[in-house]
Amino acid sequence: MDSVEAGTLKRTPLYEAHVQAGAKLVPFAGWEMPVEYDGIRAEHLRIGAEGLPASVMVVEPLGSHALVTAKVAGTPVKIEAPVDIALKTDEAIHLAFDEARARWMTGDTGAAIGQA
């Protein structure tokens, strides 16, 4: 009987947060870990002059781009932005959905929709 069947997988302190966020959890090295979330990815959003009001929490330069964490109605959201973006903590911004970068998938299988 492996650790999954025996129910002996360890859980991180963030386990409940992952479950509430809709994560798909899988066994990994003895731990129950998230590998996928439903929803909008960081690269599907852009910062602009119009859109959903948000407040900057953190800006992480990652080499080719920056990963911005902003709060929208109390919920943290990640946005991929140009690496040279000049934002400050608590700065008011607006977020828009970038349809050109979105990839639509089916909810049950995760298969791409409308792509060759």
Image: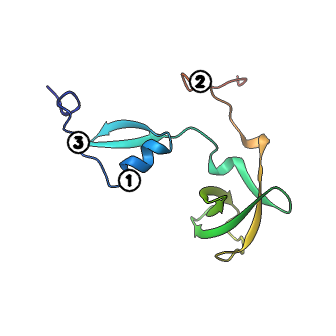
Which residue matches tag 3?
Answer: 30
- Secondary structure beneath dot 2 equals loop
Disc on the earlier residue, 3 or 2:
3
Left or right of 73 in this view: 18 = left
User: 58 or 18, which is in the foreground?
Assistant: 18
Colour scheme of the picture? rainbow
Q: Nearer the viewer, mark 2 or mark 1?
A: 1
Amino acid type at circle 2 is: Ala
User: 52 or 114, which is in the foreground?
Assistant: 52
Disc 3 from disc 1: Cα separation: 16 Å
Which residue matches tag 1?
Answer: 14
Q: Nearer the viewer, mark 3 or mark 1?
A: 1
What is the number of the mark on residue 85? none
Disc 2 from disc 1: Cα separation: 28 Å
Residue 11 placement (x, y as % from top left): 29, 47
Disc on the earlier residue, 2 or 1:
1
Rate crowding at label 2 as few (under 14), some (14 to 19) or many (20 or more) other CA atoms within 10 Å: few
At horizontal 52% and vertical 40% (from top left) the residue drawn is 37
Residue 55 placement (x, y as % from top left): 69, 67
Left or right of 10 in this view: 83 = right
Residue 60 placement (x, y as % from top left): 57, 68
Which residue matches tag 2?
Answer: 111
| Farthest-out residue, left | 1
Left or right of 1 in this view: 94 = right
